[in-house]
Image: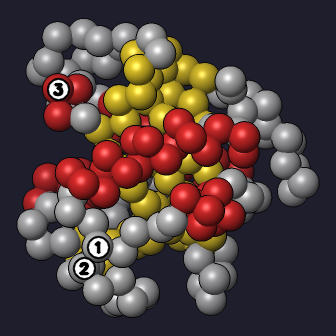
Amino acid sequence: MIFDGNSSRKEFPSRSREMTPTTHQPSLAFKTRRLPAGDIDAAWKIITEYYEAAAVIARDAKDDLARIYFQDGAGVWLATIESSVIGCIALRPLTGLESSGEVKRLYVQQPYRGRGIAGSLYQELESYARECGYKFLYLDTTDEMVVAQRFYAALGYKLCARYNNNPQATIFMRRDLRVTRP
């Protein structure tokens, strides 16, 4: 099922992209798509896999995931190969920070890393965030996630002050969507 673009804020076009990235790994055709509200189970499965792989302490319960990420200005995007989910990313509005959202749960299964999948997921999320009128995207990570830090820095994220109370996070970053990416 593909998100049909309906939103009470404004209409968003339907998006499902098939991509064959050019990276150091062999070509791999995959699709990215934003999930509709009724598809919580697909999101939950890959996000719980991410929780285990990243040893996440601050976890959303399934009901909270549905409430937080399936609303206007939020979403969960999946990367798939045929019918298999291989990656995810999520966006939620940040309360208390005007025109801002938070990037969460970027994850690509180990055998599919280095093939442009994370970049494609992120690009879908950022495009949606711009359509929603976000000016800033925030994220948090840990000292151990060096590859993630480099990935986000290459996208134009800069270190910023702590903006949340995530006990596991040690690094906080912000991207100004009004500035052209490097």
Checking the image for residue 111, the label placed there is 3
- Disc 2 vs disc 1: Cβ atoms closer than 8 Å? yes
Helix, strand or loop at disc 1? Answer: loop
Q: Where does residue 20 sit, x and y in percent of width and height?
A: 36, 13
Amino acid bearing label 3: Pro
Alpha-carbon span between mark 2 and mark 3: 26 Å
Amino acid bearing label 2: Gln
Q: Is residue 68 above or below residue 182?
A: below
Helix, strand or loop at disc 3? Answer: helix
- Disc 3 vs disc 1: Cβ atoms closer than 8 Å? no
Crowding at label 3, few (<14), some or many (≥20) Cα neighbours within 10 Å?
A: few
Alpha-carbon span between mark 2 and mark 1: 7 Å
Query: Which residue is disc 2 drawn over?
Result: 168
Checking the image for residue 57, the label placed there is 1
Closer to the N terminus: mark 2 or mark 1?
Answer: 1
Closer to the N terminus: mark 3 or mark 1?
Answer: 1
The quarter holding residue 172 reads bottom left
In front of the other: 101 or 57: 57
Crowding at label 2, few (<14), some or many (≥20) Cα neighbours within 10 Å?
A: some
Q: Where does residue 23 sit, x and y in percent of width and height?
A: 19, 22
